[in-house]
Amino acid sequence: MAHKLTALLLLLAFTVNVRSQDISAPQAHQHNLLPVPARVQFQAGRLAVDKTFRVATTGFSDERLRAGIERALWRLEGRTGLTFAPGRATDESGAQLLVQTKGPGKSIPAVDEDESYTLDVSDRQARLAAPTVVGALRGLETLLQLLEGDRTGYYLPAVSIQDKPRFPWRGLLIDSARHFTPIEVIKRNLDGMAAVKLNVFHWHLTENQGFRVESRKYPKLHLLGSDGLYYTQAQVRDVIEYARQRGIRVVPEFDMPGHTTAWFVGYPELASAPGPYEIERQWGIFDPAMDPTREALYKFLDNFIGEMAALFPDAYLHIGGDEVNGKQWNANPKIQAFMQAHGLKDDHALQAYFNQRLLRIIQKHGKKMIGWDEVLHPDLPKDTVVQSWRGQASLAQAAKQGYSGILSSGYYLDLMQPTDEHYLVDPIAANSDMTPEQLARVLGGEACMWSEYVSAETIDSRIWPRLAAIAERLWSPRETTDVNDMYRRLAVTSMRLEELGLAHRTYQGKMLRRLAADEETAPLKVLVDVVEPVKFYNRGQQHPTTQLSALTSLVDAAHADAEQARRVSMMVNDLLSDAPRFQTQRTSLMQIFTAWRDARPALELMINRSPILQESAPLPGDLATLGITGLEALEHLSTGAPPPPQWLETKRAELEQAAKPKAAVEFAVLRAIQQLVVAANELPQLKTLPPARWKEHVLELAAPKPAPPSR
């Protein structure tokens, strides 16, 4: 490669956007810990992990701690292939792991649980100390992440760790109402949550599309409002105990006064308009809402909430409270007369009246209320927690008004955004002007897995591994923001999560075989590895579905953050920014681009014989176009020869066509190909400009289009 081209490529480094930040200076010991502990210092030495590995406990011990240790040892055996001697070591000095716990902690998991721990590993022993059992459970997860191996065997590196979470509320919402989530799926996701130190399972149990929990006081709620898909109270207790064993709280959500159609199937008298009602099969915001003017409603809710408060031991009960459009209220003369008589000037005031009545019921049964942004009102009691889907500013506003809150905006997993976009969202804005007292009211955050477009088969892939990055944001120090290193550690974490039964990696092969109606799926894998589901709320427009639709299409097999696409982007970055690696990355990219180009005939044949793939018919041609374009750009960059006239315009037109979503998926590699095209085309022009103008010039030409707005 010519020296002048080498210099030019070095100056073109800024033209590539890899959806990441620069890698910071490497640590002396490159670890795979996720979340990163509050303080970690590696030292010289290592503790061997072999078949003699034994554990001893000192201080407090109970069945929860013992069970946690057994689970950790089982996973350690699975990773190493070793069989440890049964039972505990009776002599502390003879144990390779000593767990020292001061006390049990909260009898019921609580927001103020002490989850701190210290972990010190030397070449003689690992010592895990924690004030509570939950802290010890968190430390055991870190110890498992420390395991390494080489030709001499497995070991734990010598290290000193002092750790505690940055935020006390770190959760995952699973919407079991729109699509039912089987118990085994819930449990394996609880295991995954514990592995990355999340501590709140927010269980969204009621919706327009289903009422999912057994009510013995009002059985028509679940018998008529669920299609027979609901959790018995025994199953609920089982999940709560399963979560408690892992230091996870279970916060139930019963959405009201809107999102309540399924309530009205069995009890239409609760609604603001006469029935009959049916379970809603579509998605969106619907008119049915409870009638806040009926005294009978509050008697009903008193009995129902009393029953649920006895079932769910957590201190908080979530009432939803979002997206009430007010149409039934506005059309009901009796409700309008009530509002006028009580000085309620609008629907927001009527909902505030409902919330105040509901709050008294919740408090009567010993619970604290939590709701979405819409519940915020000047008359709302200060012990209510506000969950914000509107963003950091809304959360800060609530904190300034004296309310505790948690952030979910930026953590909506169903929007199919790449991991780094979630990772860089902090519950507290960098330029926050909140006082220390107000900052303390920001309790943390929750990722949300709304279930319009997930099934039991696909839900793991929509949650993991992206949730692990959000878990780090909520646990680790604020300055932990190295995106490239996060992705490196996330790849290791993703593999570890499989040992818990999570199917976020394995589901795809099964789906591709079904789509292709063949064991041979290699051409389809080439395609699916570089596409992602459309973002935000665009799937409903691109690929309309109902609650009864089968979620088994190509879009359902595509990952939200395509690893191969990100790898191609990083390779393009290397190629354009690092002259010594130009030839290596050029060769690798040529192989990938050639595979894209050559996959077209086999893909088209596969699509022609598989009706479920018919909507994907344009994609093989687009993939081939991307491959051909990439090969041409590489050729020009390699030789330094300018492309022919009109080449740029032709390629831009082809890329614009490829950029249009088809079958509800979009190519995640377009930005990288665009950068190659710009770089190839601008070689002659850049030579005529002063270097100070190159960056501005190239960025103007290659600027990405703005992303569509989210809700």
Image (tube, rainbow, N blue to C red):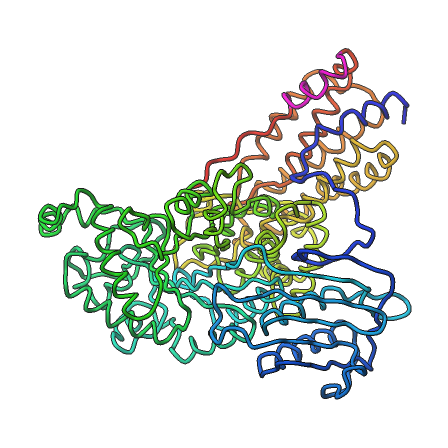
Above or below, 217 relative to 609: below
Residue 494 lies left or right of residue 612; in this view the side is right
Report the label total: 0
Above or below, 396 relative to 576: below
Residue 209 makes an appearance in the image: no
Q: Position of residue 43 (x, y in %)?
A: 83, 60
Q: Residue at x 74, y 14 (%)?
A: 685
Q: Residue at x 52, y 52 (%)?
A: 413
Residue 542 lies left or right of residue 424; in this view the side is left
Q: Which span is picked out in magenta?
A: 689-701
> In which quarter of the view is residue 701 placed?
top right
Q: Position of residue 607 (x, y in %)?
A: 59, 50
> In which quarter of the view is residue 157 placed?
bottom right
Q: Position of residue 218 (x, y in %)?
A: 25, 74
For the N terminus, which image quadrant? top right
Q: Position of residue 499 (x, y in %)?
A: 67, 69
Q: Residue at x 31, y 58 (%)?
A: 280
Residue 648 makes an appearance in the image: yes
Q: Nearer the viewer, residue 72 or 270?
A: 72
Q: Main secondary structure of the magenta part?
A: helix
Q: Nearer the viewer, residue 585 or 652?
A: 585
